[in-house]
Image (cartoon, grey):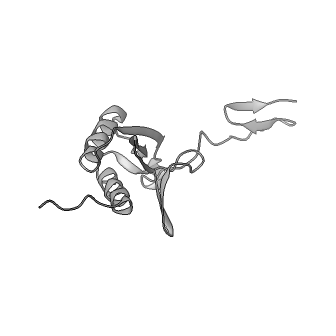
Amino acid sequence: MSPAAPSGSDRADLVADAVVAVDGVASLHGGMFGEIGTYLPGRRVAGVAIRDDGTEIHIAVTPDAVVRETADAVRRAVRAVVDTPVHVVVEDVASPSDGGAATGSAGPEPTGSSEPGSTSAPGGTLRP
């Protein structure tokens, strides 16, 4: 007799554990707006979305990770837990100054300008 398949909450936790154990993964990532996750009673597993038609994993990688190899390793690790197609999205590269933790930002931080009347914005300085 084989053990019963893990329930949704057990599966989400197993998937999350398998993902963060992969070399090159800094953390799970909830998506640009925090939209990727498995909702459970009283909590949420960010970065893991298990659906009937597939499992979606969003991660932040370490600065030294080879992105394609890390994504393939995550896919293999998750396939050991679920029987659906696995889609891996690399959302961010962790900052080495944060000890490997992902910044969670959607892009580079705005930089200031010393020019009077200018406003800083991602990607450059806006002039009036």
Q: Residue furthest front?
A: 1
Q: Residue at x 31, y 43 (%)?
A: 74
* Coordinates of residue 102 in the picture (x, y in percent): 48, 50
- Horizontal relation, residue 113 to residue 46: left or right: right
Q: Position of residue 86 (x, y in %)?
A: 35, 40
Work out which residue is located at the far left of the displayed protein and give it: 1
Name which quarter of the figure residue 71 lies in.
Answer: top left
Q: x and y percent of residue 122 in the render?
A: 68, 36
Q: Is residue 50 above or below residue 4?
A: above
Q: Is residue 23 positioned above or below 10 on the image?
A: above
The quadrant of the picture occupied by the N terminus is bottom left
Residue at the location (37% across, 57% down)?
12
| Front residue (pair 15, 5) | 5
- Farthest residue, direction bottom: 42
Residue 128 in percent (x, y) is at 88, 30
Relative to 80, 87 lies left or right: right
| Relative side of 63 to 74, left or right | right
Q: Nearer the viewer, residue 52 or 41?
A: 52
**Residue in view at x 39 percent, y 39 percent:** 88
